[in-house]
């Protein structure tokens, strides 16, 4: 659809079976922004959120650990205005207090979803900002990097700038609200797409060369102590 102010709109028609529910019009100059490579958990979350179809594009604001060789898979990449890694880390902190390429890019969007708290400070450049909190372990777990612990806590101070906060579990939402009771948080669990579906268990084990009579536990995360991998 198209309105009198010449802004493109994404029109979503909602149905339940054959029953028409409503029409939602959303400005289509919108983006999901993340800081991580597409192959990581954070990057994968942003890309899957984009697949739903309510955001126009994906944008990467690469943090210091992301190399140019790995900054792929997104519609757009906005590099910091500095080069060496140590300077890029300083840039990340400076964007909390000063304008930047990232702030200017966010300002030009009609709607933005900040896919992790490391970018929440950018909500001050766009009143139509939303965000996701996957977990808050840097401030609830004895995180060794004290600078990042300070940085993460600083980012969460911008929660009140977000129109809505998504948490991926009720536990994370509970933790968040205990520390930030004014946060407007809702739980939307992470989802899978068509590549994950029920299959014949025995056939799958045979194809993978796994024993048919054993209980198998799979973990696809890191081995950090906070992940409780040790049994």
Image (cartoon, rainbow, N blue to C red):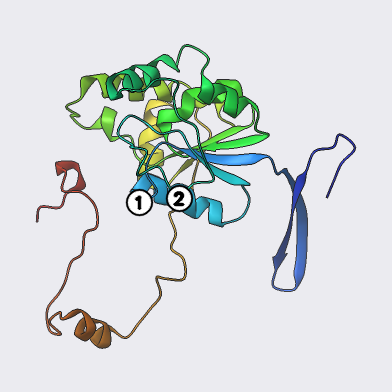
Q: CA distance from mark 1 to mark 2?
A: 9 Å
> What numbered label is drawn on residue 57?
none
Q: Is residue 101 above or below residue 76?
A: above
Q: Residue at x 46, y 71 (%)?
A: 194
Q: Residue at x 52, y 22 (%)?
A: 101
Q: Nearer the viewer, mark 1 or mark 2?
A: 2
Q: Is residue 107 above or below residue 15?
A: above
SS at circle 1 = loop
Q: Is residue 35 shown left or right of residue 84?
A: right
Q: Residue at x 85, y 37 (%)?
A: 6
Q: Is residue 116 shown left or right of residue 90?
A: right
Q: Nearer the viewer, residue 141 or 70?
A: 70
Q: Is residue 165 above or below residue 179?
A: below
Q: Position of residue 11 (x, y in %)?
A: 76, 52
- Residue 169 in sight from this viewpoint: no
Q: Is there CB contact under 8 Å for labels 1 and 2?
A: yes
Crowding at mark 2 (Cα within 10 Å: few <14, some 14-19, many 20+): some
Q: Residue at x 64, y 31 (%)?
A: 128
Quadrant the C terminus occupies: bottom left
Q: Which residue is mark 1?
A: 39
Q: Position of residue 230 (x, y in %)?
A: 10, 52
Examine the image and state in which quarter residue 192 appears.
bottom left
Q: Mark 1 or 2 closer to N-term?
A: 1
Residue pushed farthest right?
4
Q: Which residue is mark 2?
A: 73
Q: Position of residue 44 (x, y in %)?
A: 41, 51
- Residue 136 in sight from this viewpoint: yes
Q: Nearer the viewer, residue 60 or 164?
A: 60
Q: Nearer the viewer, residue 224 or 65?
A: 65
């Amino acid at each position: 659809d198209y309105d009198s102010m010449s802004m493109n709109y994404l029109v979503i028609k909602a149905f339940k079976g054959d029953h028409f529910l409503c029409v939602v019009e959303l400005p289509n100059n919108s983006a999901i922004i993340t800081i991580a490579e597409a192959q990581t958990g954070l990057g994968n979350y942003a890309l899957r959120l984009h697949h739903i179809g309510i955001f126009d594009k994906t944008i990467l604001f690469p943090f210091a650990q992301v190399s140019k060789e790995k900054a792929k898979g997104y519609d757009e990449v906005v590099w910091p205005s500095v080069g060496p890694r140590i300077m890029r880390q300083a840039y990340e902190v400076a964007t909390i207090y000063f304008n930047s390429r990232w702030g200017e890019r966010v300002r030009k969007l009609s709607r933005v979803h900040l896919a992790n708290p490391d970018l929440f400070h950018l909500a001050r450049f766009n009143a139509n900002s939303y965000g996701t909190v996957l977990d808050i372990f840097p401030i609830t777990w004895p995180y060794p990097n004290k600078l990042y612990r300070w940085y993460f806590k600083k980012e969460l101070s911008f929660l009140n700038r977000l129109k809505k906060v998504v948490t991926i579990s009720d536990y994370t939402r509970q933790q968040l609200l205990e520390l930030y009771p004014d946060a407007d948080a809702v739980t939307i669990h992470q989802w899978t797409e068509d590549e994950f579906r029920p299959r014949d268990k025995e056939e799958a084990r045979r194809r993978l060369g796994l024993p048919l009579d054993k209980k198998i536990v799979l973990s696809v995360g890191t081995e950090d102590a906070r992940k409780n991998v040790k049994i």
